[in-house]
Image (cartoon, rainbow, N blue to C red):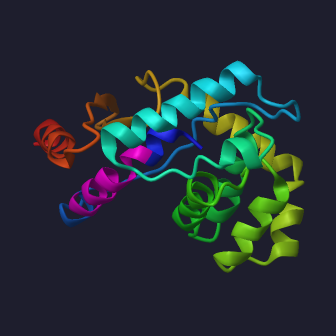
């Protein structure tokens, strides 16, 4: 649910494919972003995020459905989507879930802070809706999320999206360009050779 991650998605897709060709393993980790909340997002934050979407659209040409801001009741709560990704990770469907969340949020004006939206996405990628719902309510799931967020907070990152190279026990931040995958690819390959 990070709009800059959505903006980076086409470039990341190409970079990830090139890393795979080069035999470099990619591991996804969740950063959390915004904790659980049922409170409506303050109007000032809504305006800021809508302006951010417009900026990303203008700079990168990435599509957004701006109807989200008038059709939904935005909440600053990304942890439910993170939990959904963790559940999907268990069945090797994490990236399908992430893409489903992003498409629902940015293109379909649906709020992935809402459990019913996440259940619908889970079902659309082949997960059993009842099983998924049960998993979302498990206390151990939240513990796993908190542990992963705590782990990521130890990484040398300043925001999202972020790329970090883990090599020989060393964590190195990798610069990214929102439109040029080759910059990051070169930085990674240079660092491991």
Q: Nearer the viewer, residue 120 or 135?
A: 120
Image coordinates for residue 123, horizontal then vertical, percent = 73, 76
Secondary structure mostly seen in magenta is helix
Image coordinates for residue 77, horizontal then vertical, percent = 75, 36
Q: Quadrant of residue 134?
A: bottom right
- Figure label count: 0
Report the residue at 64% width, 35% height from top: 32
Q: Assign the C terminus to one quadrant of the image.
A: top left
Image coordinates for residue 85, horizontal then vertical, percent = 64, 56
**Is 17 positioned to the left or the right of 56 in the image?**
left
The magenta segment is 7-18
Note whether 41 is above or below 108 in the view shown: above
Camera sees residue 67: yes
Image coordinates for residue 15, horizontal then vertical, percent = 26, 54
Q: Assign the N terminus to one quadrant of the image.
A: top right
Residue 63 part of the magenta-drawn span: no
Camera sees residue 152: no
């Amino acid at each position: 649910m990070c709009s800059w991650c959505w903006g980076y998605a086409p470039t990341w897709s190409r970079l990830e494919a090139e890393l795979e060709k080069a035999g470099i393993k990619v591991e996804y980790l969740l950063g959390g972003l915004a904790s659980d909340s049922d409170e409506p997002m303050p109007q000032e934050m809504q305006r800021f995020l809508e302006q951010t979407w417009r900026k990303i659209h203008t700079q990168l040409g990435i599509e957004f459905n701006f109807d989200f801001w008038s059709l939904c009741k935005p909440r600053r709560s990304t942890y439910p989507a993170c939990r959904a990704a963790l559940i999907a990770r268990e069945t090797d469907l994490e990236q399908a879930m992430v893409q489903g969340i992003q498409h629902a949020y940015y293109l379909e004006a649906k709020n992935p802070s809402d459990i019913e939206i996440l259940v619908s996405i889970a079902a659309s990628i082949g997960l059993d809706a009842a099983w998924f719902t049960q998993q979302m309510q498990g206390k151990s799931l939240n513990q796993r999320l908190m542990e992963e967020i705590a782990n990521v907070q130890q990484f040398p990152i300043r925001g999202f999206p972020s790329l970090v190279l883990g090599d020989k026990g060393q964590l190195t931040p990798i610069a990214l360009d929102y439109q040029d995958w080759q910059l990051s690819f070169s930085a990674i390959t240079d660092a491991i050779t």
